[in-house]
Image: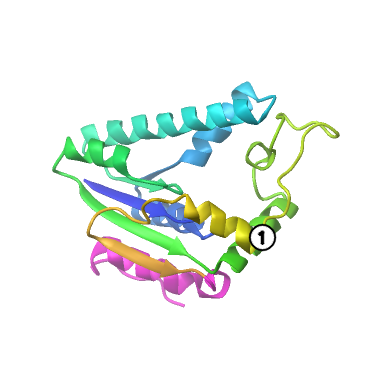
Amino acid sequence: MKLIIFTGPPASGKSSLSSDIAKDLKIDCISKDLFKIHLFDKYGFKNHDEKKLLSIKGEAMMYRVIKFYISRNKDLIIDNNFKEFDTLRILLNANNQVELFCVVCMADYKILATRYNKRIQEDKRHLGLSTTNYFPYITGISNLHKPITEDDVSNIQKNVLENSVGDNVLHLNTNHIETDYINLYNQVKKYISKGEADLIEL
């Protein structure tokens, strides 16, 4: 089976690339954020601690799904800002049939901060992810993330213990993903398909 990891900081292009690759190659794709959103919508939260607890449960759900796919030897794409890969390694050690790919998306921190803030301003980020203290959103009670800065992104990345996993890693600079998306997409598809697949033409 193929296990394809898309990792990197927020707003680095992981979700766009992973979802499009998944549709193109007809491989299921999961994201920790989707599990978190499901829990936020189902249970809501009344403070930061409750939100953090649901986030931890969302991550646990993600790993259970990964374990299931590995046990079935079924291809899977994972979109997540991993801080470390120890839990994943434990799952992989139980199955030597896994062909592991790791795509690391990265951009300048100032660019990432600008993209992240724009998503919130344009309501392109689920409110459960954007709200810091209370959800479902209530005007006057719920607070949205304050705009983040280049330093905020840097601090997020300082908590990342490992940037990648395995020996088969593709590093992508997504500074210009808005204008260079097709090229980046083709790099990923060629990397995963080992050059055998037809590439998208500009």
Query: Under tag 1, what secondary structure?
Result: loop
Marker count (numbered): 1
Q: Residue at x 42, y 53 (%)?
A: 7
Q: How did the renderer colour the structure?
A: rainbow
Residue 101 x %, y % = 28, 55
Using the image, determine if residue 198 lies above or below residue 55.
below
* Res. 10 visible in picture: no
Residue 70 picture quarter: top left
The residue that disc 1 covers is: 149
* Res. 71 visible in picture: yes
Q: Residue at x 47, y 49 (%)?
A: 159
Q: Residue at x 48, y 54 (%)?
A: 158
Q: Is residue 152 magenta?
A: no
Using the image, determine if residue 162 lies above or below residue 88.
below
Q: Which residues are magenta?
A: 175-202
Residue 194 x %, y % = 23, 66
Crowd class of label 1 (few under 14; some 14 to 19; many from 20; radius 10 Å): some
Residue 110 x %, y % = 61, 67
Using the image, determine if residue 114 lies above or below residue 49.
below
Main SS type for the magenta part?
A: helix
Q: Residue furthest right?
A: 140
Image quadrant occupied by the N terminus: top left
Q: Is residue 178 magenta?
A: yes
Residue 46 picture quarter: top right
Would residue 105 appear left or right of 129 to someone viewing this image?
Answer: left
Would residue 152 appear left or right of 121 to someone viewing this image?
Answer: left
Q: Amino acid at mark 1?
A: Thr
Q: Residue at x 37, y 66 (%)?
A: 171
Q: Depth check: 161 or 68 in front? A: 161
Residue 68 picture quarter: top left
Q: Residue furthest left?
A: 96
Residue 12 x %, y % = 52, 60
